[in-house]
Amino acid sequence: MIQRDQAEFLYQQVVRLIRQLQQQQVLRIGERLPSLRQLSQQLGVSIPTVRQGYEELERLGVIEARDRSGYYLKAESQPSCRPGRLPLNSEPVPVRQQTLLEQFYQAVHQPGILPLGIAQPSMAHPSEKALLRTMRRVTTLAGHQVMHYGPIDGFAPLKRQLAFRYLDVGLSLQPDELIITNGGQEALAIALQAVAKAGDVIAVESPTYFGVLELIETLGMMAVEIPVCPDDGIWLDDLQHVLETQPIRACVFSSSISNPMGSFMPDTQREQLVTLLEQRDIPLIEDDVYGELYFGVQRGRPAQCFSRKGLVLTCSSFSKTVAPSYRVGWLLPGRFGTEVWRLKRALSFSSSLLNQWTMSEFIVSGDYDRNLKKLRQALRLNKDRMMALVQQHFPVGTKVSHPQGGAVLWIELAETVDCNHLFQQALHQQISIAPGSLFSPSQKFTNCFRLSFGVRWQPEVEQAIQTLGQLVVVAP
Ligand SMILES: Cc1ncc(COP(=O)(O)O)c(C=O)c1O
């Protein structure tokens, strides 16, 4: 029942056990839970561990403490409803996001602000100690070598390790089929320029990550929005309709874990997606930066696994799993290797050798996988906590995504609420959120916003959700 050799904390195992008993209806609503002493004896753990588990369940709204009487299972609060299906608008639109984006980024970096708008999953379980230890070791080992320009395509040992890791998901690659970039953003920028030019029409998810929209804007391209299902990624029938009616040059989708919706496209659908696009010779840029941060049993297979014509370009990075400041990402260019290589050389020569070397050693030492496992657990727990708080403090009728990985919740409020205004009000309370219209080139989602649970959990976070709920209640 309780396993001491697991990475999961003992109190988390207590939380899981009580939830299982609740689901199996062994424990029913209104029933008293075993006392702290009873459960600690039954499970062979300490009383403080059981207490910590019960406190966590209380925080999640599953149980309540009654004065001098013990802990009781609460009635299920209303299951939060997911956002609904959006209508398709298949017309391409230019992207103009600059003003709001500038305000958003300024807010993120203001001192004293609680950054609930930015997606930094690694903050939920920072690995800075292990990482700094690794970097010190590399600096000593490699000496002046790390001060040179690195190879354009990246540090060979890191490329080998990444190629080796892809074998786990059934993708067999040679290290030279992979190029290291300055984060996932450079990978996306290179991929887009390798397959499209100014004036071309790019299909994106709706809602989509605003960094993709900013690239499309900067490169003078146009966007068509394909609605995302909160569970399974883009609606393939909508995509098919757009492919039949619009001159789509390329697609940028995050089918592993989408941002901001947190949906996960099952492998069978992912295969259909690749087939649909390759039949028409349309490249797919797969943004896979959240691929490793799934909450299910296994990560999704990258779309590359289903490609027959080499038209899939996969972009990823260590920003979400380890630390964004290292700016180490990568790109699997498919058949566009020559163009991608040329663009990398033209845009930035190479990526930091010290940082690549550190990531490489971080993987070899086993620290990467150990941290990743704990990070996924911390994120899943934060997600449950944040969903429970939103349910508790936001008005009835608020719709919330049920992310299957990653670090963000997508929240849909009543249509009358203006989240650009909410963004400003939240800033006055020292909280930053990401207003929904950032995620659409046609300023949809004005009544939505993104909330990050990629945070070190602390009372300030709980207070901030309560404050946001109050602001929404009084919002015009
Ligand atoms: C979906 C998505 N893709 C790409 C990026 C960029 O990643 P990186 O920080 O590695 O450049 C982000 C960062 O927020 C993201 O959310």
Image (cartoon, rainbow, N blue to C red):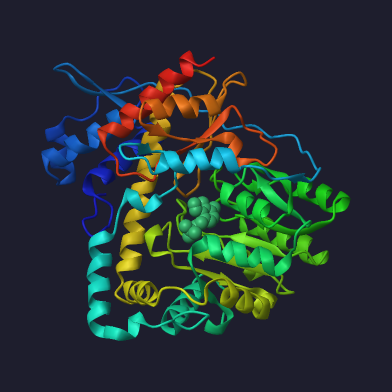
107 lies left or right of 364: right
124 lies left or right of 193: left
Q: Residue drawn at (36%, 53%), measured in percent from left and top?
A: 122
Q: Residue drawn at (58%, 20%), measured in percent from left and top?
A: 414
Q: Position of residue 103 (x, y in %)?
A: 50, 38
Q: 414 and 292: which one is in front?
A: 414
> Given the current orientation, which residue lies at the most extreme right position?
245
Q: Where on the picture, by quarter, is residue 206?
A: top right
Q: Position of residue 289 (x, y in %)?
A: 51, 59
Q: Position of residue 367 (x, y in %)?
A: 30, 68
227 lies left or right of 459: right
Q: Residue drawn at (66%, 35%), measured in percent from left and top?
A: 443
Q: Residue drawn at (60%, 32%), measured in percent from left and top?
A: 83
242 lies left or right of 435: right
Query: In the rendered image, is residue 172 in sight?
Result: no
Is 321 above or below relative to 360?
above
Q: Can you say which quadrant of the picture contains the C terminus?
A: top right
Q: Position of residue 21 (x, y in %)?
A: 34, 36
